[in-house]
Amino acid sequence: MERDTLKSIIEALLFVSGKPIDLDKFKEVIGEERSKIRDALHEMMEEYQSSAKGIEIVEVAGGYQMRTKSDFSEYIKNFFQMKPARLSRPAMETLAIIAYRQPITRSEIEYIRGVDSGGILRALLERKLIRIVGKKDVPGRPLLYGTTREFLELFGLSNIKDLPTLKDLDEINGESEILIEEKEQVVPERNDNNDSRR
Amino acid sequence: MNSAPKIKLEIFEGPLDLLLHLIKKNEVDIRDIPVAVITKQYMEYLELMRFLNLEIAGEFLVMASTLLYLKSRMLLPEEREDDEEEIEDPRKELVERLLEYKKFKDLAELLEKRKLVNRDVFVRETAYNAIKDEMHVEVSLFDLLDAFRRIMERSKFSEIYEFVSEKINIKEVMLSIVQKLKNGKKQFDELFDSSYTKEHIIATFIAILELAKISLIRIYQFELFGPIYITLLVSAEICRKIISEIGDEIGEGYPEINN
């Protein structure tokens, strides 16, 4: 199959599918090798990125998806007459704890937050941003929570290892506001001792 | 009047959040917390929340007793070093919890900065299913309480009229707030006329909280400790309709003030 034909087919598939498509699905539908499809996809990602297009192709939740470029969000919100969707701060906090510490029980979450979190957990479960992944092997067998595919999609992460680290926060803030000393094993690429207080 | 039903505001924010807020506000080192100062301010917040009849979660009270205990420990002279064991800073456990909690707050902020679906980027078909949140409060409850306290302090109440017990209907206050917000966002302070009585100021504050709770308004600020803005999330008409459907018990909850 010609490279250009392959790319056109991929483009058509990405266009009709709202959900991310993974390489296995592409292979099944197109009948080409995974590596060829992958190469074509990455070439397309660059093309979309570098040219004046309103859409880009991103790697998300283990697949590939077409998304509008963030520069145009205002126009889209105007078009749909929608208010910006937001997660409340407590919901974001709880989500962060679950994302970085999963699998985790409700009482462990509440210990970190210092406050009852049952309502938030229910809301996050309803929105499918978290799920029950099992039961902890301790007395009482409490439920364990973890993040979902929808979580990865919402935040544009290709997988859970893609989560930002505290080091990223440092870079954004310029100077460190975070005073972290312990070595955090759950945060991917653990940050070095960045105790750069003023 | 303790028989008044408590107003339950599900902000879900706890004592650790309040402590971080105070530490930041006082610009003190999280590892060297001036316990006496922070405890005093913490208690003032609880007092304010109690005054407003906000439901105070048990966790706040547990933390209050921890703080009082720490305060007394800090007053004691250092124990003699008889053993080889080092004397532990009594604040150590609390500091560790605060740091741990702060770390996740920072991480949450990082996640928030990503390009979120239906906020920054959009995908096919799902654009309609905007992820709606039950709460749009982006300003913490404590920031709001601060702003409320400033307004209370700013207002000069006429002592003469103090005894007049006004009966204020919260639903009506909610409607008048909607009216003020009809043409766009307003600063928090602008919702309080300078002619307002103490009762009216409190009622207005409670009405704002109620409006946030039922997601009719969004409370936000552009920078930390910056001015607080309030905007309608749906049209004024819809707001009025929703408010008219609220039961009348809502008006009963606010505290009466006895001088």
Image (spheres, coloured by chain):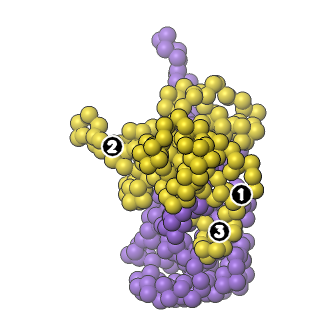
Chain colours: A yellow, B purple
B139 vs B70: above or below? below
**Residue A83 location (% of width, % of height):** 60, 71
Which label sits in the foreground, 1 or 2? 1
Instruction: Give the Cα distance between marks 2 and 3.
Output: 36 Å
Image mark for residue A133: 2
Q: Mark 3 falls within which chain?
A: A
Image mark for residue A53: 1
**Residue A139 location (% of width, % of height):** 23, 36
SS for callout 1: loop
Which label sits in the foreground, 3 or 1? 1
Left or right of B214 in this view: A106? left
Residue B220 visible in rendering: yes
Q: Mark 2 falls within which chain?
A: A
Q: Mark 1 falls within which chain?
A: A
Nearer to the camera, A145 or B18: A145
- The residue that mark 3 highlights is A76
B178 vs A6: above or below? below
